[in-house]
Amino acid sequence: MILPLEASILATAVELSRAGVDEFHGFELAKRLRDDEGRRNLTAHGTLYKALTRMEKAGLLSSAWEDADQATGEGRPRRRLYSITMSGRSALIQVEREAEALDRFDPGWSPS
Amino acid sequence: MNGTELLWVALVRRWAALYTRGLPADVRDRRLLELESDVWEHLHDADERNVRRAVFGRFLRGIPADVWWRYHTLLESRRARPRSQNMSTSLRGNWWVILTAILGVVPLGISLAMLATVSGGGAIRLVGVAGAAVSGALLIGGLIRRQSDLIGGSQMIVAGAALTLFGLESMGVGIIVLVSGFWTGNLQLSAPSEAPDLQPVRQQQISMTHYWFLWLAGAALLFAIGWIPLIAEGGDLTWGYFIWVLSWLGAIVTGSIGIILAGLRFTLRHHTRRTDAPASQAT
């Protein structure tokens, strides 16, 4: 089961991928999530990195440390780079379909 | 970086070092390096207007998730190890067992002291004596049971520690045992592989009753809150009376749910074992 936080991360990963960014690091993700009012609480260090680890274990994301030379060259600590997997994309599509189905659901009455 | 920013960064680092302490080296290093990178990026981000507030906010809001993550990482790492290694780990972390054993004697001592020295009080005194004795017995019994049944023993310890919260004299014991037990991962309350021989539906029924002791802990906490207005009897007792009544009523309801769930759990497990026994014997 995909949690709302995980769906938000997957959606952001797809947005980044569409913008040509296939790999992203924790802070970059937090920055994107923060711009969305409803997702701001997800950017807390503990919440974000716990979710990223869980999603990687579930096969929704993959990650690797970036090349040490590149980080040293730019004078900063190494980044852990994440990318969305095929399972992650499929899971997001399923979540979006379920959300659409829920939106279309007509109970046949309305509280007038 | 100015002074305040340095302070927040130092605070984030200190907290990260604290909650990753005792975790497997690879997990700990990854979290620390990722945080180091995150904080660095944050401080050097050109778009960030209020770095101090943002770093502090992200750190503060993540604390509950950090604690929860630590607890689960400890549980996972222990499950992944062979039993022989777990034994050596538990010996290395024996300070918690020793501490709990020592603290477990305190409620028993209180119980005996109350029985010997306090006169009068009738039923209330008897309830106090019995409560202290049961909580001490649960703490010590839980430590013993923990050797063969880690989860069952942990549940007994949590229940015993929760009971100590009912008494002002013993309250500290429960708080120390619970906080240190969860922090060190010694109190293992969940087990996905628990009772693998059970049928899925029954397993589900049992998992619903799995958290009986948390209800008892909640009852104990409400009961402890009820003491506050009683202690502050010099103050305005109008609000104090309501808090006292509400918290103790809440404790009765919550405690009753805990007792019902515990009873259900015991009945379900007992029933499942009995009905599964002939099938396993036949195979």
Image (tube, rainbow, N blue to C red):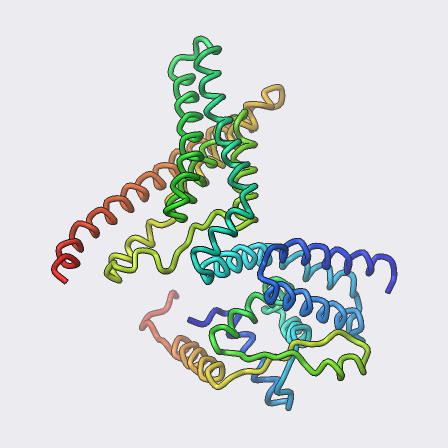
**Residue placed furthest toward the right:** B2
Name the residue: 79% across, 69% down: B43
Does residue A23 appear left or right of residue B264 in this picture?
right
Does residue A110 appear left or right of residue B235 in this picture?
left
Residue B231: name its quadrant: top right
The image position of residue B148, as x and y in percent, is: 37, 46
Name the residue: 62% across, 59% down: B62
The image position of residue B191, as x and y in percent, is: 39, 56
Quarter of the image with the C terminus of chain B in it: bottom left
The image position of residue A37, as x and y in percent, is: 63, 69
Q: Closest to the observer: B2 or B50? A: B2
The image position of residue A13, as x and y in percent, is: 58, 81
- Asked whether the viewer can see residue A71, the reply is yes
Q: Is residue B215 above or below residue B123?
A: below
- Asked whether the viewer can see residue B214, the reply is no
Q: Closest to the observer: A43 or B193? A: B193
Quarter of the image with the N terminus of chain B in it: bottom right
Q: Closest to the observer: B47 or B149? A: B149
Name the residue: 13% across, 55% down: B278
Question: How many labels were placed on the picture?
Answer: 0
Name the residue: 56% across, 37% down: B176
Residue B204: name its quadrant: bottom left
